């Protein structure tokens, strides 16, 4: 006897092949198509015990018929696989009670596990075909389709309709605040308050009062943020900065949802979903005794790790373009980036992550008079490297990064070969060096030459060539 029948819809024939072969080996009967219309016929005629489907097919998007499929076959488990993974796809999948959601490229073993689990359970969540229409792409809160971001969307999709506590980890500017808000806005608490507490910005002594409120003798105290967030989400930004006493109080609250205001008072209750974020490694803080281990485990129920931008450079173009569109909507003139600008943006490592990219694009959009932005304009707005104490190696790396950016801008800005780059770049390096050497020796060329390790006549001719007058 044949095993269960799996319907597969995907526009990519190699994906259909891989899935079909793997599942056939596992004893399933597989029917595959690249057309939503064909799939719909199968569904209507009652075929299939499970559906694995891509989102965009040549004829239609699966979400165009998802409501109908759900209506016709409410019991049919559905696994969505998508290369166009965005929060939107994940949300739609979740709205339609999709059993599982795998971003492409997916691991075939994961898929096969998901199939097994789905067939065992056959539990379909309350079917409520959503009337929510696909919003415009630019309305999406999170931008980027790289594999690391797809994993992020996957976690968001899994947790958004739960009350699970999420710990978001990532460098500064990677989008932790944005993700926290997205989880709230897409989830079942979206009509409740989203209360963000920035622990890095609070004085240590203020934290407990701010979170839990203050009671006074007359009974009218100040309401804390925990209470403000009742029915919604409490976002603890930079939770690693929380003082130990406040950690203890928070832990007690997390255990039973009860708390009393700072300074004593009646026991109160608040129903909040907690999302915490940190740019530090909390585990290290725990090891060093700066963070309660039990609280760490309470918070780290679901871990969401945001990748630094340098690990997902393929998202840079999409982000930069979206920020330009945003700048235009904020009233700045319409601008476009040319190829040289994109090359330069992709070559840089973005230590400040998306925030740095966003600020850069905003500055360029505001300051550059040209409608087409080239590497030159980008280069001009790239922040000068912050001054800090650094080792020789760091200095060299920084100088090299700075110069590379500059050279790339120059190289991509030339129309034809002007044959002058080499000499002009050397000049740019020589000029400040010789000027400083002359300044340090009060214009004594003999001493300057010896400091620089140059022949006296060579120095003299360079000074003439660079048109550095003796008095400079
Ligand atoms: N994936 C993303 N798509 C669009 N904008 C982003 C993304 N990640 C971050 N940003 C933007 O970058 C800035 C910094 O994000 P934020 O969430 O405050 O970072 P963090 O909290 O990690 O420091 C914000 O203006 C945010 O809108
Ligand atoms: Mg933040």
Image (tube, helix red, strand yellow):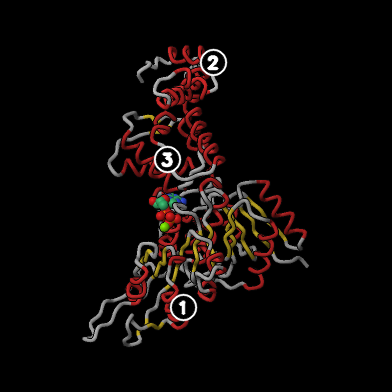
Q: Residues within 10 Å of mark 3 (few under 14, many from 20)?
A: some
Quadrant of the image containing the C terminus: top left
> Residue at the spot x=50%, y=29% of the render?
408
Asked if residue 127 is positioned above or below residue 182 in the image, the reply reads below
Callout 3: SS: helix
Whether tag 3 and tag 1 are in contact, CB under 8 A, the answer is no
Seen at 51% across and 47% down, the residue is 309
Mark 1 = which residue? 251
Q: Position of residue 435 (x, y in %)?
A: 42, 23
The circle on residue 455 is: 2
Q: 63 or 429, which is in the foreground?
A: 429
Q: What is the number of the mark on residue 321?
A: 3
Residue 152 visible in the picture? yes
Query: What residue is at 69 percent from the left and 56 percent from the top?
Result: 108
Q: Give the alpha-carbon distance from disc 3 to disc 1, as whole Å.
A: 43 Å
* Rendered location of residue 187, percent (x, y): 43, 66
* Percent coordinates x, y for residue 402 in the rendering: 48, 34
For marks 2 and 1, the one nearer the N-term is: 1
Q: CA distance from mark 2 to mark 1?
A: 72 Å
Nearer the observer: mark 3 or 1; the answer is 1
Q: Residue at x 47, y 45 (%)?
A: 389
Q: Secondary structure at mark 1?
A: helix
Q: Upstream in the sequence, badge 3 or badge 2?
A: 3
Q: Is residue 292 above or below residue 98?
A: below
Choose between 351 and 95: the one closer to the eye. 351
Which one is closest to the eye, mark 2 or mark 1? 2
Earlier sequence position, callout 3 versus callout 1:
1
- Count of numbered circles in the view: 3
Tell me the distance, in whole angstroms, between the alpha carbons under discs 3 and 2. 52 Å
Q: Quadrant of residue 328?
A: top left
């Amino acid at each position: 006897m044949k095993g269960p029948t799996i319907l597969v819809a995907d526009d990519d024939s190699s994906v259909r092949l891989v899935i079909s072969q793997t599942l056939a080996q596992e004893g399933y009967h597989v029917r595959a198509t690249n057309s939503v219309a064909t799939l719909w016929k199968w569904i209507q005629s009652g075929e299939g015990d499970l559906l694995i489907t891509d989102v965009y097919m040549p004829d239609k998007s699966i979400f165009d018929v998802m409501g109908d499929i759900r209506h016709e076959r409410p019991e049919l488990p559905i696994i969505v696989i998508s290369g166009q993974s965005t929060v939107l796809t994940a949300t739609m999948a979740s709205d339609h009670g999709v059993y599982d959601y795998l971003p492409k490229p997916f691991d075939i073993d994961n898929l096969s596990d998901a199939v097994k689990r789905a067939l065992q359970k056959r539990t379909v969540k309350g079917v409520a075909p959503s009337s929510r229409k696909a919003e415009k792409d630019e309305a999406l809160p999170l931008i980027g389709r790289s594999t690391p971001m797809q994993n992020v969307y996957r976690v968001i999709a899994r947790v958004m309709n739960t009350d699970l506590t999420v710990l978001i980890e990532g460098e500064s500017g990677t989008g932790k605040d944005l993700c926290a808000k997205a989880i709230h806005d897409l989830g079942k608490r979206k009509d409740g308050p989203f209360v963000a507490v920035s622990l890095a910005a609070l004085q240590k002594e203020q934290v407990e009062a701010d979170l839990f409120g203050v009671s006074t003798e007359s009974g009218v105290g100040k309401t804390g943020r925990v209470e403000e967030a009742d029915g919604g989400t409490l976002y603890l930004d930079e939770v690693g900065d929380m003082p130990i006493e406040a950690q203890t109080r928070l832990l007690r609250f997390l255990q039973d949802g009860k708390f009393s205001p700072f300074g004593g008072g009646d026991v109160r209750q608040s129903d909040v979903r907690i999302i915490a974020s940190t740019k530090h490694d909390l585990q290290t803080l725990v090891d060093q005794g700066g963070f309660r281990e039990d609280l760490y485990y309470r918070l780290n129920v679901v871990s969401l790790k945001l990748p630094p931008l340098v690990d997902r450079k393929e998202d840079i173009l999409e982000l930069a373009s979206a920020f330009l569109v945003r700048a235009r909507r904020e009233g700045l003139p319409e601008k476009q980036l040319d190829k040289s600008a994109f090359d330069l943006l992709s070559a840089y490592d973005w230590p400040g992550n998306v925030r740095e990219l966003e600020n850069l694009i905003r500055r360029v959009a505001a300051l550059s008079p040209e409608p087409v932005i080239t590497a030159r304009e980008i280069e001009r707005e790239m922040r000068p490297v912050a001054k800090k104490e650094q080792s020789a190696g760091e200095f060299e790396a920084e100088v090299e990064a700075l110069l590379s950016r500059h050279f790339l801008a120059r190289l991509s800005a030339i129309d034809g070969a002007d044959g002058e780059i080499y000499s002009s770049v050397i000049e740019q390096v020589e000029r400040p060096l010789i000027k400083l050497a002359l300044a340090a020796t009060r214009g004594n060329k003999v001493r300057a030459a010896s400091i620089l390790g140059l022949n006296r006549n060579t120095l003299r001719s360079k000074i003439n060539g660079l048109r550095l007058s003796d008095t400079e």
